[in-house]
Amino acid sequence: MDLRTQNVSKYFKHDGQFEWNHITPADYKPTDDSWKGVSRRVFVGETGESPLFHLRYFEVEPGGYTTLEQHMHEHVVTVMRGTGTAVVGCKEFEMGFGDVLYVSPDDPHQFKNEGTEPFGFMCIVNAERDRPRLANMAFCPICE
Amino acid sequence: MDLRTQNVSKYFKHDGQFEWNHITPADYKPTDDSWKGVSRRVFVGETGESPLFHLRYFEVEPGGYTTLEQHMHEHVVTVMRGTGTAVVGCKEFEMGFGDVLYVSPDDPHQFKNEGTEPFGFMCIVNAERDRPRLANMAFCPICE
């Protein structure tokens, strides 16, 4: 039995350079032109764990950005590395280490790295969640 | 209307010293002799947010420790500050910045700070969860 895929306690050791044991980086999404230079690491949610949430680490390289999207499930983001910009509706936040952002249901959002160092953050989502769609910025629920 | 208690997007800025805007530190639990020197800060879960999980930051001062306890709800912990020891059943992990620990259902666990700097970590739990009970280490599910 491979314990890595069972619902047992698991320890993911950080190597000091934003890689972890037992964690393999993957692309953020299938390639399309809505995003650039983003990698994804999943700690909890795809290997047998039972919580009602998943924990992932995303890293945006300099010049990169995530899809400007919206969905009914919430995000909670904590910055671990570097600095970047969070777009939430009509607002922008310059985020750095330790900053926490809650994105409420259906708010359009995007993470961008306009700096020179990688921008990395933990992101929590509900285990069961709806599919993201491209944001409609003409109807921003924050700006309305 | 106080937006801080509504289900809207929220940004918690870290001050560089492990305090955040809009976040007031509280005791970890009512005082008893099962724990020592632990503070608790809640980002998501007690002020109107809708996710199926809560996000809290706990800080254990040098010489402090959390209750050695167990419960059916899971923990996911990410270290943000300092170093400390995680006890999970019969195992101990020396944790530092960026390390991630998943504690599966009913595993006895405790966090201790035997160092000289504060030990701080983010901890995610299901929004609906059972009440912790003192750990019965005679029946550790890991050691069995």
Image (cartoon, coloured by chain):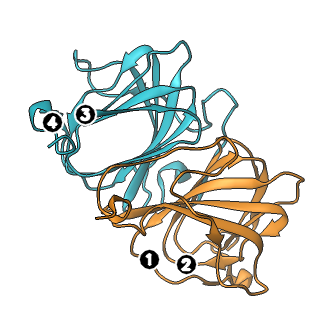
Chain colours: A orange, B cyan
Q: Local crowd at mark 1 within 10 Å, few (<14), some, or many (≥20)?
A: few
Q: Nearer the viewer, mark 4 or mark 2?
A: 4
Residue furthest out toward the front = A1
Q: Is residue B115 above or below residue B20?
A: above
**Tag 1 subunit:** A
- Numbered disc 2: secondary structure: loop
Measuring from the top left, give residue B116's x and y in whole percent: 54, 12
In this rendered view, identify the residue nearer to me: A69 or A139. Answer: A69
Which of discs 2 and 3 lies nearer the camera? The answer is: 3
Marks 1 & 2, CB-CB < 8 Å contact: yes
Type of amino acid at the residue the image marks with label 1: Arg
In front: label 3 or label 4: 3
Disc 2 to disc 3: CB gap under 8 Å: no
Residue at mark 3 to residue at mark 4: CA–CA distance: 17 Å
Alpha carbons under labels 1 and 4: distance apart = 31 Å
Kind of residue at disc 2: His
First in residue order: circle 3 vs circle 4: 3
Crowdedness of circle 4 by 10 Å Cα count: few (<14), some, many (20+)?
some
**Tag on residue B90?**
3
Classify the position of the C terminus of chain B by image quarter.
Answer: top left
Res A33 seen here:
yes
What crowding class fits label 2: few (fewer than 14 Cα within 10 Å), some (14-19), or many (20 or more)? some
Which element type, helix, strand or loop, lies under badge 1?
A: loop
Disc 2 designates what residue?
A71
Report the Cα–Cα distance between label 2 and label 3: 42 Å
Q: Could you tell which of marks 1 and 2 lies nearer the N-terminus?
A: 2
Taking the spot 43% from the left edge, 69% from the top edge, the residue there is A46
Foreground disc of the pair 1, 2: 1
The chain carrying label 3 is B
Give the amino acid at mark 3: Cys
Is the residue at mark 2 from the same chain as the one at mark 3? no
